[in-house]
Image (tube, helix red, strand yellow):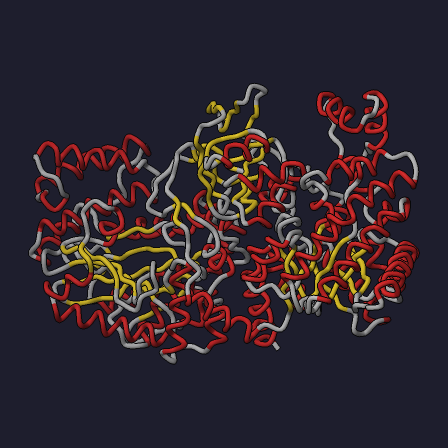
């Protein structure tokens, strides 16, 4: 038996259903489903997505037997309709439309009115007794066929149409008559002959196969590829092709066409919303050639059809149990439904519709949780460019932190703080940011950098702050005179730009932003989420302010508190530099004693905010040279402050520089070399914990040793921490429960996790470094080539954005399994940037982690992703 590729649908015989979406595409599956429901669907047939897959695999050749199967289904359609394709006297006309399993609106091609030629147009005119409709349809067909199938520029046809309207002194297409269309058709055919070297095809069968070729070909057109990239659509076979008998909305004022949503797609309100035009075809509604009417007006114009539409709306929404996007045509007072699909909606609408449908009994709470995407939820938490704004994009970078920002360009952190203190809104524009820029980053509305990736300093800090950030913008060139070029255009300090961090876009306009409100619906929805979720969600936070924001968003503790970020605040940087530049232990301890009360107060503030929740504090991690300036003028200023010879200071600074600092003297290696650093930080943590305990705060400190690669490194530092803590407990005659664990970010640590777990009480995977060391990629430099890797299919995703489950993930599984072999109750989490990325969170849940930790503004996304991961796993099982 030969392979089946074509599926018929009619009220008497239908071969498809909605469950065959992967095979028939969304449009084809839903046409079959609606036909089965008894709705008024024009009959037709669908060529499966498998054919698209084979079409490309076989160098644009169709599988054996397809043409015969299409001919058989076409004959069946002709018999059903009592007409033949392109017949001279009474032609059957068809539409040829795309339709993938995942909706890609407007990205692929459609051809309408196929089957018309110089003879059949006369037959259509006589049969319908409406010559204008016949010639209007022929005009539309040649225009669409020329554009979609023959790749003739659409504007060439539009120019002819507009010239004819100007010549006649009319504004709209509906004001043109038969003679006008005949003149237009002659010019259209002339354009096709000039552009292609061939006459317009008069054979209806040839038209059909050329159209089928074009629709399958559109699967890999530029806009479809880009759409799939942007929306991360992968794993589909391709598009199906739907051949369906035409119904006409352009027969006169008794006919029309429209698009409607069963609920308001912008607000989620439970009201029928849509637009329509009388005496028109589908493309007229979306093309903006004429101003459509709101669908409510149809109630006055044709109450019978309007009531039928309402009935279809209720039927489809109850059947699909989701908001539907419906295309309809009215042909001479008869309603036909041409398409239904789950409607696109704003994040606000998605939440409201999900909640309302639970109350209406249409879906369960669990289904409601699955109805809102994590990307959509993200939109609720950041300012966005007003959707009504049409704007010019002059450059693109990485969408490092979502939302939008408008402000004046500044080139230094100091200037950002200065201008912000005066009430100015600024965008900090830098080649790259460093920890010293933190004040300016905090003051700025958004950050734009020329270099760096999704886990660069700018990206990580911006996400933590909830700031918009576009990183790695290759078209940004910063000049030395407080000016820059973006996309070849010159800017000076004070010029306005707008950033779209959700898309990585830079605009040279001052655009209007809208600030989303976290409504009661949001809170209700998150309650549903938490009822499903079993995995914990913590935050990465370094200040009491960040901690408070995270707690507001539902954080259940802190999974990563980076102590080094505290060292840059106020005067404490001077004490840090004094510690670094000291020549002996006594000097370092003297300097560390100055830092101790400052760090202790930081921890007190964080513990108080996180009352009752665990707080994981990472000991000092970065290499020491990061705390020192590098330019001569800055070193001269520091030498005066420190009372130190400039040349001696420069020599010391140079000696701290490393060829590869990310693999150098940092993390636990610093504390092993200089144990007094670990002593000071332990003092600050334990003293702060004892202090807040006396105030009635429930405190659960977790001290995390970074960059451990051997069990001896961990044991060396844990002994120092435990000894110091015991001394403080005896001195204060009080104690707190604390844990000592490690950050797993070196591949070796995964393989010896059983040895480390003999003393470690928790693991936290630092996947930024673990990814870097597993791949051998520098995370700050890989942005140069990783986009090409993804584009060319070398890697499915940027591994710094989405966890590499095949490689890095396998190491994590080894570490988890080995650790829990020794310590069955070992608490395990993740605190890299992947802790806020939904697919990575799903992996973390599936391998049995206790929690994920992410930046404050991604807490709700992580909560939703964790709940969805649990639901998916249970549904599979």
Q: What residue is at 20 percent from the left and 47 percent from the top?
A: 117
What is the tally of numbered marks visible in this picture? 0
Would you place residue 10 above or below residue 196 in this image?
A: below
In the image shown, does 702 or 643 lie closer to the viewer? Answer: 643
Residue 74 seen in this snapshot: no
| The image quarter in which residue 157 lies | top left
In the image shown, does 362 or 337 lie closer to the viewer? Answer: 362
Relative to 508, 43 lies left or right: left
Q: What residue is at 87 percent from the left and 35 percent from the top?
A: 582
Relative to 50, 330 lies left or right: left
Residue 229 seen in this snapshot: yes
Q: Position of residue 147 (x, y in %)?
A: 31, 41
In the image shown, does 386 or 873 lie closer to the viewer? Answer: 386
Which part of the image, by quadrant, shows the C terminus?
Answer: bottom right
Q: Position of residue 70 (x, y in %)?
A: 37, 61
Q: Residue furthest bottom?
A: 361
Relative to 726, 839 lies left or right: left
| The image quarter in which residue 804 lies | bottom right
Q: What residue is at 69 percent from the left and 45 percent from the top?
A: 565
Q: Position of residue 4 (x, y in %)?
A: 45, 67
Q: Position of residue 198 (x, y in %)?
A: 30, 35
Relative to 643, 483 lies left or right: left
Q: What residue is at 23 percent from the left and 46 percent from the top?
A: 288
């Amino acid at each position: 038996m030969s392979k089946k590729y074509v599926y018929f649908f009619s009220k008497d015989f239908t071969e498809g259903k909605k469950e065959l979406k992967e095979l028939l595409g969304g449009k084809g599956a839903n046409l079959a489903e609606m036909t089965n429901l008894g709705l008024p669907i024009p009959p037709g047939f669908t060529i499966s997505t498998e054919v698209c897959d084979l079409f490309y695999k076989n160098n644009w050749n169709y599988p054996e037997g397809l043409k015969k199967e299409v001919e058989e289904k076409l004959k069946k359609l002709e018999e059903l309709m009592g007409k033949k394709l392109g017949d001279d006297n009474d032609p059957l006309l068809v539409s040829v439309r795309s339709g993938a399993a995942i909706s890609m609106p407007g990205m692929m091609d459609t051809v309408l009115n196929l089957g018309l030629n110089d003879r059949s147009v006369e037959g259509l005119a006589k049969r319908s007794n409406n010559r204008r409709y016949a010639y209007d349809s022929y005009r539309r067909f040649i225009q669409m066929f020329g554009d979609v199938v023959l790749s003739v520029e659409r504007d060439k046809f539009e120019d002819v149409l507009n010239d004819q309207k100007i010549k006649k002194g009319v504004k709209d297409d509906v004001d043109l008559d038969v003679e006008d269309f005949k003149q237009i058709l002659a010019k259209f055919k002339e354009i096709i002959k000039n552009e292609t070297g061939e006459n317009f095809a008069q054979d209806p069968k040839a038209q059909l196969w050329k159209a089928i070729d074009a629709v399958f070909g559109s699967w890999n057109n530029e806009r479809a590829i880009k759409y799939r990239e942007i929306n991360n659509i992968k794993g589909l076979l391709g598009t199906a092709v739907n051949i369906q008998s035409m119904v006409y909305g352009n027969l006169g004022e008794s006919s029309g066409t429209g698009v409607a949503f069963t609920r308001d797609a912008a607000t989620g309100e439970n009201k029928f919303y849509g637009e329509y035009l009388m005496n028109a075809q589908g493309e007229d509604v979306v093309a903006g050639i004429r101003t459509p009417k709101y669908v409510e007006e149809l109630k006055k114009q044709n109450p019978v059809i309007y009531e039928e539409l309402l009935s279809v709306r209720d039927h489809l929404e109850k059947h699909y149990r989701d908001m539907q996007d419906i295309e309809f045509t009215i042909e001479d007072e008869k309603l036909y439904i041409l398409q239904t699909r789950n409607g696109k909606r704003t994040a606000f609408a998605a939440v409201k519709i999900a909640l309302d449908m639970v109350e209406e009994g249409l879906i369960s709470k669990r289904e409601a949780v699955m109805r809102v995407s994590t990307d959509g939820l993200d939109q609720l938490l950041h300012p966005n460019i007003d959707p009504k704004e049409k704007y010019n994009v002059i450059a693109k970078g990485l969408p490092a932190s979502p939302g939008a920002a408008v402000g004046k360009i500044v080139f230094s952190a100091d200037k950002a703080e200065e201008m912000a203190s005066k009430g100015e809104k600024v965008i900090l524009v830098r080649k790259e940011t460093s920890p010293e820029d933190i004040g300016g980053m905090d003051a700025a509305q958004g950050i734009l950098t020329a270099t760096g990736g999704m886990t660069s300093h700018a990206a990580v800090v911006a996400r933590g702050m909830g700031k918009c950030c576009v990183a790695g913008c290759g078209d940004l060139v910063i000049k030395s005179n407080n000016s820059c070029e973006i996309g070849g255009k010159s800017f000076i300090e004070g010029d306005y730009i707008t950033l779209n961090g959700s898309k990585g876009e830079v605009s040279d306009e001052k655009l209007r932003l809208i600030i989303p409100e976290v409504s009661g619906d949001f809170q209700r929805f998150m309650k549903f989420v938490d009822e499903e979720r079993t995995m914990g969600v913590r935050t990465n936070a370094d200040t009491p302010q960040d901690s408070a924001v995270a707690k507001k968003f539902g954080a259940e503790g802190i999974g990563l508190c980076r102590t080094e970020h505290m060292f840059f605040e106020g005067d404490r940087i001077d004490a840090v530099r004094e510690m670094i530049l000291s020549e002996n232990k006594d000097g370092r301890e003297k300097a560390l004693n100055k830092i101790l009360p400052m760090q202790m107060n930081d921890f007190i503030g964080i513990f108080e905010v996180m009352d009752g929740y665990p707080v994981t504090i990472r000991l000092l991690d970065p290499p020491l040279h990061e705390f020192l300036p590098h330019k001569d003028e800055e070193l001269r200023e520091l030498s005066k402050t420190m009372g130190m010879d400039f040349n001696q200071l420069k020599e010391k600074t140079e000696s701290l520089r490393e060829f590869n600092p990310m693999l150098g003297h940092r993390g636990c290696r610093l504390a092993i070399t200089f144990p007094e650093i670990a002593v000071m930080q332990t003092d600050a943590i334990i003293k702060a914990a004892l202090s807040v305990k006396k105030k009635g705060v429930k405190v659960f400190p977790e001290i995390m040793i970074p960059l451990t690669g051997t069990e001896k490194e961990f044991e060396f530092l844990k002994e120092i921490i435990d000894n110091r803590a015991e001394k403080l407990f005896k001195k204060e005659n009080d104690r707190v429960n604390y844990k000592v664990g490690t950050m797993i970010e070196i591949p070796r640590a995964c393989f010896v996790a059983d040895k480390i777990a003999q003393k470690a009480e928790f693991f936290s995977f630092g996947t930024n470094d673990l990814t870097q060391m597993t791949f051998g990629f520098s995370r700050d430099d890989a942005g140069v080539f990783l986009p090409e890797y993804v584009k060319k299919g070398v890697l499915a995703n940027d591994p710094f954005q989405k966890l590499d489950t095949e490689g890095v993930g396998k190491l994590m599984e080894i570490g988890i399994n080995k650790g829990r072999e020794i310590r069955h109750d070992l608490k395990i989490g993740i605190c890299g940037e992947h802790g806020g990325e939904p697919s990575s969170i799903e992996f973390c849940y599936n391998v049995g982690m206790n929690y994920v930790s992410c930046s404050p503004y991604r807490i709700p996304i992580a909560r939703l992703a964790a709940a969805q991961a649990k639901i998916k796993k249970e549904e599979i099982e």
